[in-house]
Image (tube, helix red, strand yellow):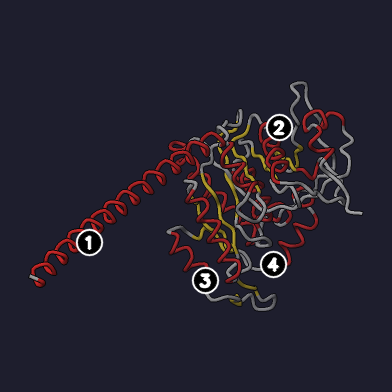
Amino acid sequence: MLAFTSVKIFMHLQRNHNRIKIHRSLSITNSISLDKRKEKEMETKRKELMARGLPKQKPLKGVKQIVVVASGKGGVGKSTTSVNLSSALKIIEPKKSVGLLDADVFGPTIPLMMNIRQSPIVNDANLIEPLINYGVKCMSMGFLTDKKSPVIWRGLMVMSAIDKLLHQVAWDPLDFLIIDTPPGTGDTHLSIIQNIPVTGALLVTTPQKAALEVTRKGADMFKRLNIPIIGIVENMSNVVCPKCNNEITLYNGGTKMMAEELGVQIIQTFPLSGDIVKSCDTGKPIVLSTPKSIYADAYKNLAEHETPKLASWMTHYGYGILYVNYGISINDIIENKAIYNIFGNFAKISIFRNE
């Protein structure tokens, strides 16, 4: 009798245990299902908020092709590439109009490298007229500010400035616009990519490991944003002996490995050259200062390589952008009232000194 009672108790406990297991299993299943639903809903909301926050792309009036010269890393020669590429485009395509935009709000170098020191004027349509030298239309925050004062701005002010440099400058008409961008993968790059249609990005790097790792991040940014990469320009890869003209390799081919990983081409390689440095410091691109040099020929070859590719891509994408690295400084007060009318209070009230 005792054994029978024990069996009954055991079976009762077993049934209760099974019910608890089933209940737990259903609870876990329901919980997982609920978590997945919540995750889906949150992702949908995120996408809606992101879509709501992104600006609509507006083509630049009269600008046919826009190219971005970028790196992610500073000091690799993006500005040097930009000024020489824009000047070379004008040489090989004299009937075409070429523009150069300095997109580095904190450290512009275009005023120095293109030897432009005057301030721009505003036309009757309330647009800033770009300054022209060597046949290239140029615009930079460096034209609007004192070169000795720093710009101390937050991201939103930088984005607003970039928008105005793009849309409130009289670029029209323009066949090629080259945009020289600062280092990094932040506000400036996103402002340009989200505001105007971009055909492709030209990456500039040195073969140094530190530069390559950051340039790879820049390349990944463009791929995530669906911007085609035109190719790579490798700077300072070797030194040419002044006596025997032999090339002395400085690095171990890291750029080639990166290009293979990214599936892009190294379009042009430039040595470390005192002549290129001097041409930048004196404000006359080497394609103009020493037009028969091997360096000038290399930049012209780069421009000749870009022209048909951009024309081909324009059929598919419509526009292109060229990003390059620049430096900028801003004066405490923008004195030109016409410029003030365009840039508004954000320019005046956001510049301050650290006492």
Instruction: Say the numbered circle drawn on residue 17.
Output: 1
Q: Which numbered disc flags the more N-terminal residue, 1 or 4?
A: 1
Q: Which residue is mark 3?
A: 254
Under mark 4, the amino acid is Ser
* Residue beneath the point at 74% across and 22% down: 125
Judge depth for marks 1 and 4 and give the one in front.
Answer: 1
Instruction: Say the numbered circle drawn on residue 273.
Output: 4
Judge depth for marks 1 and 2 and give the one in front.
Answer: 1
Q: Is disc 3 in contact with disc 1, using a CB cutoff of under 8 Å?
A: no
Cα gap from disc 3 to disc 1, whole angstroms: 64 Å
Q: Residues within 10 Å of mark 1 (few under 14, many from 20)?
A: few
Cα gap from disc 1 to disc 2, whole angstroms: 77 Å
* Nearest to the observer: residue 169 or residue 13: 13
Q: Which numbered disc flags the more N-terminal residue, 3 or 1?
A: 1
Judge depth for marks 2 and 4 and give the one in front.
Answer: 2
Q: Which numbered disc flags the more N-terminal residue, 3 or 2?
A: 2
Choose top left, top right, bottom left or bottom right for residue 297: bottom right
The total number of labels drawn is 4
Instruction: Say the numbered circle drawn on residue 169.
Output: 2
**Residue 54 horizontal/vertical position (percent):** 56, 37
* SS category of the residue bearing label 4: loop
Under mark 3, the amino acid is Gly
* Nearest to the observer: residue 201 or residue 9: 9
Cα gap from disc 2 to disc 4, whole angstroms: 35 Å
Q: Which numbered disc flags the more N-terminal residue, 2 or 4?
A: 2
Q: Is disc 4 in contact with disc 3, using a CB cutoff of under 8 Å?
A: no
Judge depth for marks 4 and 3 and give the one in front.
Answer: 3
